[in-house]
Image (cartoon, rainbow, N blue to C red):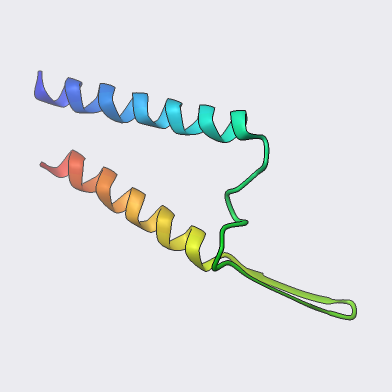
Amino acid sequence: MNEVGKLLVVTGLLIAAVGAALWSGKGWIGHLPGDFHYTRGNFSFYFPVVTCVLLSILLTLLLWMFRR
């Protein structure tokens, strides 16, 4: 029964996160402070550092929850 509880909590959090992202409508994923965007002439370089770090932390926590 413990695994079912974890699955329900994770599913609820994912649904809430998707709902919050859709509700805000701003598309803040990938446009956080600390994400690099460099444009010069017809060259553009974009690297979402902070977004990658946050996604890494989130996935690490989720995998840690399922392993316990």
Q: Give 25 or 45, whichever is nearer the viewer.
A: 25
20 w.r.t. 59: above or below: above
What number of labels is visible?
A: 0
Q: Residue 37 location, x and y as percent?
A: 68, 71
On the picture, is 67 further left or further right than 38? left
Q: Quadrant of the C terminus?
A: top left
58 relative position to 32: left or right: left
- The spot of residue 23 in percent (x, y) is 60, 28
> Residue 21 vs residue 16: left or right?
right
Q: Is residue 61 above or below residue 43?
A: above
Q: Nearer the viewer, residue 57 or 67?
A: 57
Image coords of residue 62 (percent x, y): 28, 43
For the point 61% across and 34% down, which residue is it? Answer: 24
Left or right: 36 as drawn, with respect to 6: right
Residue at 89% from the left image edge and 77% from the top image edge: 42
The quarter of the displayed image where residue 47 is located? bottom right
Of all residues, the one furthest to the top in this rendering is: 1
Residue, x 41% and y 56% (percent of image)?
54
Measured as percent of width and height from the top left, residue 53 is found at: 42, 62
Residue ID at (60%, 48%):
28
The N terminus is located in which quarter?
top left
Residue 26: name its quadrant: top right
Of residue 47 and residue 7, the one placed in the foreground of this image is 47
